[in-house]
Amino acid sequence: MPFRKMNLKNLRILFSVIIGILILLCIWTYWNLNKYIQTVDNIREANFTIQTTTQILSLIKDAETGHRGYQLSDNEVYLEPYFIAKSEIPEMIDKLDSVSNYQPEVVTKVDRLRDLVQNQMEIIEKILQATKRETAILQPEELKLMQEGRLNMDQIRQVAQDISLVTSGSTQIEIEEEGGFRKLTPINFLVIVLIAFGGILLLFTRAVQLLEERDKKSKNLAKALEELEDATDRSKQVSKLLRNVLDSSRDGILAYEAIRDEEGAIKDFKILLANESATHLTNRDQFKLVGQNLMEVFPGHAGYLFNEYCRVTETGWDFKSEIEYDLDGKLTWFKVLATKFEDGFVVTFSDITKEKETGIKLANYTQELKRSNEDLEQFAYVASHDLQEPLRKIRSFGDRLLTKYKGELDENGQIYIDRMQAAAKRMQNLIEDLLAFSRITRSSELPGAVDLNLVFEEIEDDLEDQILRKNAKLDISKLPKILGVKSQVQRLFQNLVSNGIKFSREGVDPLVKVSAQKFKADELPEKFSISPKYDNYVVITISDNGIGFNEKYKDQIFNVFQRLHGKNEFEGTGIGLAICKKIAVHHGGEILAESKEGEGSNFIVIFPSSS
């Protein structure tokens, strides 16, 4: 409705206009009623004037007729109209005179009528006196009086007629005005009633709306109060929860507000909040901390820490550091993180003294372990290199014995020399594998993009004899480039392919499949436990249909000298998979094994991608 959009100012203006219109209409109506009443009174007086004039004229006529009858009959009964007229006419003329004051022209004629009527009554009186005679013949004096009375009577009739005409004319005008007032007055009343009713209806409607709005606002207020109470309860619960969360934190938390001088520069910080851990870590009472100044409670913050806290407050840049702090005469290591909070900051800190001590010890242990590993690798390299010469001599002297003294040796002697030569060969292979194992981390070759397709082509050429001998088949998919040292990458995959051909089932031609798949660092399968250092990785899978192994040994097979079969069943030194493991880890990757006995094995290798 339009009233809902009407503001208080417009509503006041509207009611003022309505009241003004009602006042004007009331004044106009009062004026109309007053004029109507006055007109009605004038009409009534005019009618009374005409009626009285007519009555006076009638009484005069009756008196005139009566005295004539008396003259003729000498009967006093005929004088009754005369006595009536003589008694009533003066009073009537006085009334006529009193009601004709509103018309000056009528007043003059009424005065004239009074004189004429009085004159006529005097003439009649004289005639009656003259009538007291003894003869029936009219005397000359009577005739003269009767003539005079007739003329006076004519003037009375004329004056009475004039009074009636003047009064009738003004009465007609008054009647017309009275008709207009009679028509306008009900209309005025109707308009006043309608406007008053409309104003009352408008006021009632607005009042109802205001009551409805008040009820609605009351309900909304009640609802708002209820919601406020709920919000207050929730706020208290949240506040309590936050307090509990703060106090349950093992890290100390302190909130500070900047204290500035007149120029706006920070001169100190006021502590606004402290959790229980903060009081425990700083050996301060919680209630004594809150409200205190930073430099009063922790004077050791002067200088570097205070300047950093000012920088955090002014710039909003976080401050994160590990610092050694003199806390009540005891040097303590703290890990500190300060972040801006309004015109101040919030600092979170924890005691890392034990971690620092452990870290120092761990760093020392790591350094010692690294040095020990380097010594072991150096020893393995030197020992393996130095063992080569005696082995060559043993094999050389064995060959000479077989060549020069073959005829002098019996069958057992020849067997012993063959076994010695085989053992020397195995020893040489073992030493070569040890040398290769120790050289992995000592390689000076820098990693680069390695095309696996070319690598597997070279592997296929190198293993051609083994492939033909075992009637093996290689199924190699299109492979991407990886990041690594080519010689080491080739050695790793050649060992895996060679093992896939070597450990084949009896009566089944070996089949080795090679496939690859790219992954982003955050998409790597969960089975890989590496910490990604690169954005993209390549997962290469080498599958075979060989004898397989029990998966409980899937981790042990990558240890040095670990064999699942006797050396007489399958040749080898037991170092090949250890070398594969070390190459994969050295490149920031990993190698896993999956297998089922009698069905084959899957070796899954992960390398960083070159792209």
Image: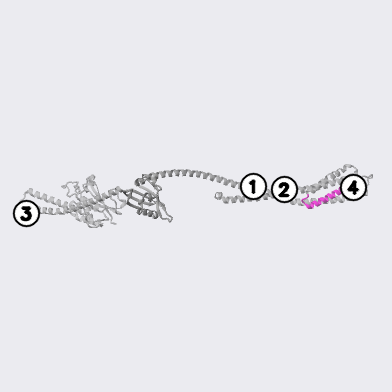
The quadrant in which the C terminus is found is bottom left
Q: Is mark 2 on a helix, strand or loop?
A: helix
Name the residue tied to disc 1: 193
Which of the two discs, 1 and 3, labels the residue nearer the N terminus? 1
Name the residue tied to disc 2: 37
Q: Would residue 108 be counted in the magenta stretch?
A: yes
Q: Which of 453 and 219 is in front in this view?
A: 219
Q: What stretch is highlighted in magenta?
A: 100-122
Between the residue at mark 3 and the residue at mark 2, the CA separation in whole angstroms equals: 174 Å
How many discs appear?
Answer: 4
- Is disc 2 surrounded by few (<14), some (14 to 19) or many (20+) residues within 10 Å? some
Q: Which residue is drawn at 90% across and 47% down?
A: 127
- Is disc 3 surrounded by few (<14), some (14 to 19) or many (20+) residues within 10 Å? few
Q: Which mark is on residue 404?
A: 3
Between the residue at mark 4 and the residue at mark 2, the CA separation in whole angstroms equals: 47 Å
Q: Is mark 4 on a helix, strand or loop?
A: helix
The amino acid at mark 2 is Ile
Q: What element carries label 1?
A: helix
Q: Which of marks 3 and 4 is in front?
A: 4
Between the residue at mark 3 and the residue at mark 4, the CA separation in whole angstroms equals: 221 Å
Residue lying farthest to the left in this orientation: 408
Horizontal and vertical percent position of residue 553? 22, 45
Residue 529 visible in this rendered orientation of the protein: no
The amino acid at mark 3 is Lys
Name the residue tied to disc 4: 126
Position of 165 with respect to 205 (left or right) is right
- Is disc 4 surrounded by few (<14), some (14 to 19) or many (20+) residues within 10 Å? some
The kind of secondary structure the magenta stretch mainly shows is: helix
Q: Residue at x 34, y 46 (%)?
A: 281
Between the residue at mark 1 and the residue at mark 2, the CA separation in whole angstroms equals: 21 Å
Cβ–Cβ below 8 Å for labels 4 and 2?
no
Which of the two discs, 3 and 4, labels the residue nearer the N terminus? 4
